[in-house]
Amino acid sequence: MTKRVLGVVGRSGNGKTTLLEYLLPHLVAQGLRVNIIKHSHHDIQLEPAHKDSARLRTAGAAEVLVASPYRVSLVQELRDQAEPSLSEQLARLSPADLTLVEGYKQIAMPKIEVYRPEVGKQPLYPHDEHILAVASDASAPPMDRSLDWLDLRQPQQILNWIMAYATK
C-alpha cells in the first residue's frame, strides 16, 4: 500500500519529467521508497516487435511478464477493454512511501503543478483546487486562494516541500 500519492502535473513542455529526474535520486537518498506512474495518451511500445515477449502478446496473451535478475516488466494488452483507472493502477504497485503520478491531471488527487510561463500555455492551478503547490520560474501572481509557490530554479526547495508532504 502506498502511503502518499502526489500528482505532478502541468502542460506539455513545462519540465515535469526533468523535475522528477532530479527529485527521484534525492528522495531515495532520504530513505523513501518511491513509485512512479507515468500516464501517456499515446500507444506505447515497450519491446521490439521481433522479441519473444512482443510476439507472445501479439499472438493473444492478455498479459506478458518478463523477468530477469535485473528487472521485471508486466505488459497488459487492453485490446477492447477500458483503460484501468488510476486507483486500479495504484493497487498493482508494490508498497511505497510515496507514489508520484505524472499525468492524470484531471483526476482528483493532491498535486504539484510545474508551470513555466515562457512555454506559452495556460496554468492549471486557477481551475484545480487539488493543486497544493506550483513549481515555477516566475514570481507568484496575486491569487484567490492559498497555495505554496516554489522556485523551479531551486529544486532543493521543491524537494523539501515533497519530503514534508511525503512524511506527514
Image (cartoon, rainbow, N blue to C red):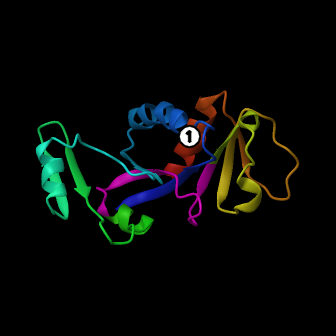
Reading the image, the residue beneath label 1 is 16
Which residue occupies the foreground of this view, 136 or 51?
51
Magenta-drawn segment = 92-112
Amino acid beneath label 1: Lys
Q: Residue at x 60, y 43 (%)?
A: 12
Name which quarter of the figure residue 138 lies in: top right
Q: Is residue 109 above or below residue 122?
A: below
Q: Residue at x 37, y 62 (%)?
A: 89
Residue 25: x percent and y percent? 41, 32
In the image, what residue occupies the spot 71% across and 36% down?
A: 119
Between 19 and 148, the residue placed more toward the observer is: 19
Question: 74 or 150: nearer the eye?
Answer: 74
Residue found 46% across the figure and 57% down from its top: 4
Left or right? Give the position of 42 relative to 51: right
Asked whether, in this view, residue 89 is left or right of residue 133, the answer is: left
Element at badge 1? helix
Q: Is residue 35 above or below residue 135?
A: below
Residue 76 picture location, percent across and down:
25, 60
Q: In the figure, 91 relative to 70: above or below?
A: below
Q: Residue 39 in magenta? A: no
Tell me which corner region of the image, top left, top right, bottom left or bottom right, holds residue 107. bottom right
Q: Please tell me whether residue 153 is drawn above or below residue 55 in the rendered image.
A: above
